[in-house]
Amino acid sequence: MKKSYLVGFLALIAAIAIIVSASKDVSTYATFENAIQNQNRVKISGEIDKNGEVVYDPIKNPNSFTFLMKDSEGLSKKVIMKKPKPQDFELSETVVVTGQMDGETFIADEVLLKCPSKYKDEELKLRSEASLSS
């Protein structure tokens, strides 16, 4: 067997292994209700429930914070994140959490934040100028 065939065969096996390992981490978007029913790893998109308390004490446990989140259907659940609180967490408009339900609590291992756009202030300023000139 030629060395070039062997190298090509090994590269093919490595590519297949990478694709298989990457496909295991694929999560689907769901609501809290879906996550309660199927108990699989999911992503839930929503917003921070401003009526709830954000609990983070870096002195006691820097790798844990808790907050309330409303999903797209308006259902609010407690979310526990097993990592430090992201910077500007309270300023975010939309939150996407990845993890799974444990009873009535969502245990997240990832939190993605969609923070307000830097252009939003400019847009509000332009709208207010337009309404004043009309």
Image (tube, helix red, strand yellow):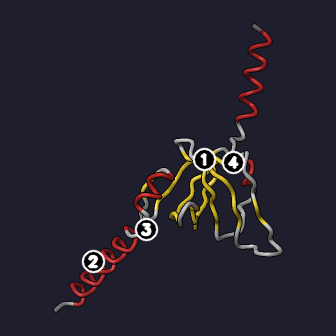
For badge 2, the amino acid type reads Leu
Query: Mark 4 sits on what residue?
Result: 92
For badge 4, the amino acid type reads Ser
SS state under label 3? loop
| For discs 3 and 2, the disc positioned in front in the rendered view | 3
Judge the density around disc 3: few (<14), some (14-19), many (≥20) Cα neighbours within 10 Å: few
User: Alpha-carbon distance for marks 3 and 1?
Assistant: 24 Å
What label sits on residue 12 in the rendered view?
A: 2
For marks 3 and 2, the one nearer the N-term is: 2
- On the image, the x and y values in percent for residue 27 come to 43, 61
Observer-nearest residue: 95 or 131? 95
In the depicted structure, whether residue 42 falls above or below residue 14: above
Judge the density around disc 4: few (<14), some (14-19), many (≥20) Cα neighbours within 10 Å: some
For badge 1, the amino acid type reads Lys
| For discs 1 and 2, the disc positioned in front in the rendered view | 1
Query: Mark 1 sits on what residue?
Result: 70
SS state under label 4? loop
